[in-house]
Amino acid sequence: MRLLVTLTSMTMEQPRWNFEQEPYPDGADETDVNLRAYFDRMPDEKLRLYNADWTDEEVIVWDGNFRSDGNLMLICTERDVDIAEYRRVLAECVAYRNRARGIV
């Protein structure tokens, strides 16, 4: 089932994934939640292309949303997300989607 939310003239499709709501082992700040939401909205086709053996530079190019200072371009956050944190949470997201694909 697809859920569409219409705001005036803008339509936003809600992701079928809900990684954002998975338990956070060490608690979560606004940045943690926003990063998971960022991955929820990443198309599965793109996520499946990810290779954990890539260099940091290859991951940055693959994502296409990193700033020149090496941090992810993510709005409404309390702190910067560097490539190490990005890769750690991305690995968690990949594991989540591998579990969830048969359910959603």
Image: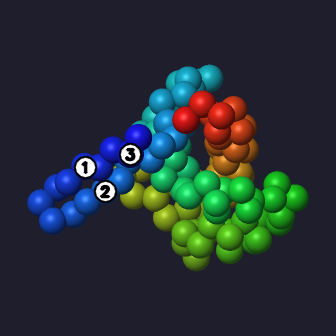
**Which residue is depicted at the point 74% across and 62% down?**
49
Circles 3 and 1: CB distance less than 8 Å? no
Residues 71 and 90: in front is 90
**Label 1 SS:** strand
**Which residue is depicted at the point 49% across and 64% down?**
73
Q: Residues within 10 Å of mark 2 (few under 14, many from 20)?
A: few
**Label 3 SS:** loop
Quickly name the residue at label 1. 5
**What is the three-letter code of the residue carrying label 3?**
Arg
Picture coordinates of residue 85, whole percent (x, y): 66, 48
19 to the left or right of 13: right
Quickly name the residue at label 2. 12
Relative to 80, is 59 above or below? Answer: below
Picture coordinates of residue 29, whole percent (x, y): 46, 35
Picture coordinates of residue 6, whole percent (x, y): 20, 54
Relative to 58, is 53 above or below? Answer: above
Q: CA distance from mark 3 to mark 2?
A: 11 Å
Which of pointers 3 and 1 indicates the residue nearer the eye? Answer: 3
